[in-house]
Amino acid sequence: MIQIAGMNGTEPKIEIFKPFAEAFELMKKILFQPFDLKKWLVIGFAAFLASLSGGVSSSFNPLSRWSTREDNKAIAQSFHEMWSAGQFEWWVIALIAVGGLIILALVLALVWVGAHGRFIFTDCIVRNRAAIVAPWKEFRAEANSFFLFSVLVLLILITFAIVGVLGLALPLILRGDGSRPGTALLIAFCVFLFFLACLAFGFALTLQLMVPIMYRQRCRAMDAFGQTIRLIAGHPGPVLLYMLFFLVLVIAAAMISCAATCVTCCIAAIPYVGTVVLLPIPVTLYAFSLLFLRQFGPDYNVWADFMPPEFLPMLSSVGPVPPPPTSSLNPPPEPPSSAA
């Protein structure tokens, strides 16, 4: 078992495997003990909403793999041929601009709904209930703040990617059309892509840790982001192990998702249907994040104010009272008093 404790012995032990085991038991309690189809479908819908903003379940959504490299290459080749032939009229450019704005608005709307979905899904797990409307209204302010912060993070990542790609491509642009990238440039480009992927993954996990903090403290996104950064800076070892273990879980979930898609003849690739079929996976992963954070104190414990009674045997932090020592059960007889 992986445990990281403070040097002075006063800090709580931060574990990795124990929260995951508790999350698995919590998933069984929520979904199977007892099994309720209506509850399953409602929580599945909450998980589907959460995936719209890049939540856990979207990381292994089979739909994200429908666009292949050949499709992207064919689309790019078509645009290149049209541009070379001078077939772009003003109305075509205007139509593309309007279509781009519509797509952008649709994406922002989905991210906005997904931000609310994260809090709804968290509430379903924390309170062991199947509800959509009530948590939507209760955490409306926090979800809107999280949405704006997510858009800001996305813009930062896109800007960083564009600047990095242009910086690497600038030598080729200055050399002319006949130049080819050298080995050093290709290596630099691969390193940049790897760094960008790590940065995006780190931001995604940071956003995921922010949601329980905002849920628990009812604070804004910037406050939750600051607390998350301080938490990572104060406990880099446990958080790094958590991120690595979570990455392994996401990869395993993606493999299970692909296998389920093949077994069900692509039925699991349908967005909501796939989430319902694979619902134990996002419930376990979300619960794992909640249980990992609660180890850092009551400010990060989403069950600090309320815990369903059925969760008490699994999540109660109070251990059983140790039995008294044997000597206390059979006290030695008192010596006889001497006669006066």
Image (cartoon, rainbow, N blue to C red):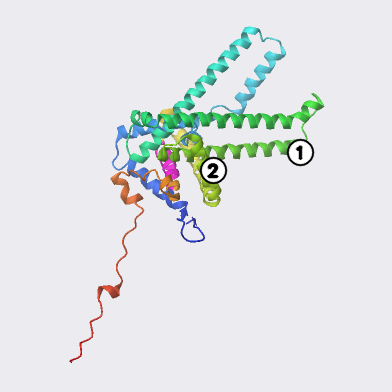
- Looking at the image, tell me whether mark 1 or mark 2 is earlier in sequence order: 1
**Where residue 287 appears, x then y in whole percent?**
41, 43
Q: Is residue 138 left or right of residue 93?
A: left
Q: Nearer the viewer, residue 244 or 338?
A: 338
**Where residue 150 appears, x then y in whole percent?**
52, 31
Q: Secondary structure at mark 2?
A: helix
Looking at this view, name the residue that lies furthest to the front.
340
Look at 31% across and 51% down and name the residue there. Answer: 313
Looking at this view, name the residue that lies furthest to the left.
339
Examine the rendering and report whether any part of residue 274 can be seen: no
Q: Residues within 10 Å of mark 2 (few under 14, many from 20)?
A: some
The magenta segment:
278-291
Q: Which residue is mark 2?
A: 229
The amino acid marked with disc number 1 is Ala
Q: Secondary structure at mark 1?
A: helix
Q: Nearer the viewer, residue 108 or 90?
A: 108
Majority secondary structure of magenta residues: helix
Above or below residue 131? Residue 310 is below
Q: Residues within 10 Å of mark 1 (few under 14, many from 20)?
A: few
Q: Nearer the viewer, residue 158 or 252?
A: 158
The amino acid marked with disc number 2 is Ile
Look at 61% across and 29% down and name the residue there. Answer: 158
Instruction: Tally the marks.
Output: 2
**Where residue 339 appears, x then y in whole percent?**
18, 91
Choose top left, top right, bottom left or bottom right for residue 186: top right
Examine the rendering and report whether any part of residue 162 can be seen: yes
Q: Nearer the viewer, residue 41 or 243?
A: 243
Above or below residue 304? Residue 170 is above
**Where residue 94 appears, x then y in whole percent?**
61, 10
Q: Which residue is mark 1?
A: 184
Above or below residue 82? Residue 67 is below
